[in-house]
Image (cartoon, rainbow, N blue to C red):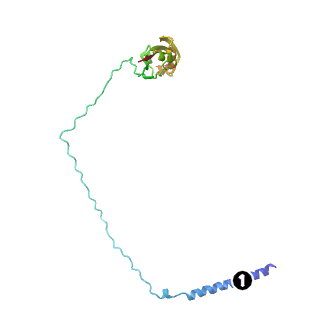
Amino acid sequence: MNMPVRIGFSFVPGAIVTFALLVLMVTLIYTTTVELDDKPARKIADIHQPERQVEERVQQQKVERPEDPETPPPDIPEVQETFEIPDNAVSMAAPSLDSALSVGLGSFASDTDYIPVYVPQPQFPRRAQTRGVSGYAVVEVIITTTGAVRDPKMIEEHPTGYGFGAAALRAAERLKYNPRVVDGVPQEVPGVLYKFSFLIE
């Protein structure tokens, strides 16, 4: 089937459908009711609002000044407490290892500037603890430019043979000092002594 014939066959149904729609529309227009058009229109009254002048009414409250007190309150005196602390005082509480053991910490130094800022807790020797022996050990350290210590050496131990010197050397490696500064340059300080005391209460 060629193209003109196909167009002709499709044109005929389209024309029939278009004509049917026109007939339907005309029928709907002429069969609707006309009551709405016959009723008189209702007039809506105009809304008129008279102009009003708005007045602001602000009541100002007057605050009365309080009367001055007859007698002013007494001045509170400043209490300043002063405590005298000796130059060679060492404020360090020795923590207890248990209810019967304590390690006392005291310093031996050629200058009061070499009081440590941190003292580690040495371990009480096991042999001395089991036998109920108290003692002490004196160590010599070199204070570095950063405040740490190096090359700890045992100077004195009493009594010997109970491990007080070894325990003091291990604790001395963790001592901390304020470094000595001369003309803005930190200096090493050799020969600083420190005493660790091991007491059984």
Relative to 23, is 57 on the left or the right? left
- Count the marks: 1
Q: Vertical placement of 50 versus 56: above or below?
A: below
Q: Residue at x 33, y 23 (%)?
A: 83
Badge 1 marks a residue whose secondary structure is helix
Is residue 136 visible in the rendered structure shown here? yes
The amino acid beneath tag 1 is Pro
Identify the image quadrant of residue 195: top left
Q: Residue at x 60, y 88 (%)?
A: 27
Is residue 195 visible in the rendered structure shown here? no
Camera-side residue of 120 and 43: 120
Q: Vertical placement of 41 versus 148: above or below?
A: below
Q: Vertical placement of 51 versus 182: above or below?
A: below
Residue 58 percent across, percent down from the top left: 28, 59
Residue 138 percent across, percent down from the top left: 47, 13
Q: Residue furthest front?
A: 130
Residue 33 percent across, percent down from the top left: 52, 87
What residue does disc 1 label?
13
Camera-side residue of 6 and 157: 157
Relative to 26, is 153 on the left or the right? left
Relative to 74, is 165 on the left or the right? right
Q: Residue furthest right?
A: 1
Q: Residue at x 58, y 86 (%)?
A: 28
Identify the image quadrant of residue 92: top left
User: Label 1 neighbourhood size at 10 Å, few (<14), some (14-19), many (20+)?
Assistant: few
Residue 117 percent across, percent down from the top left: 45, 22
> Where's the C terminus, which quadrant?
top left
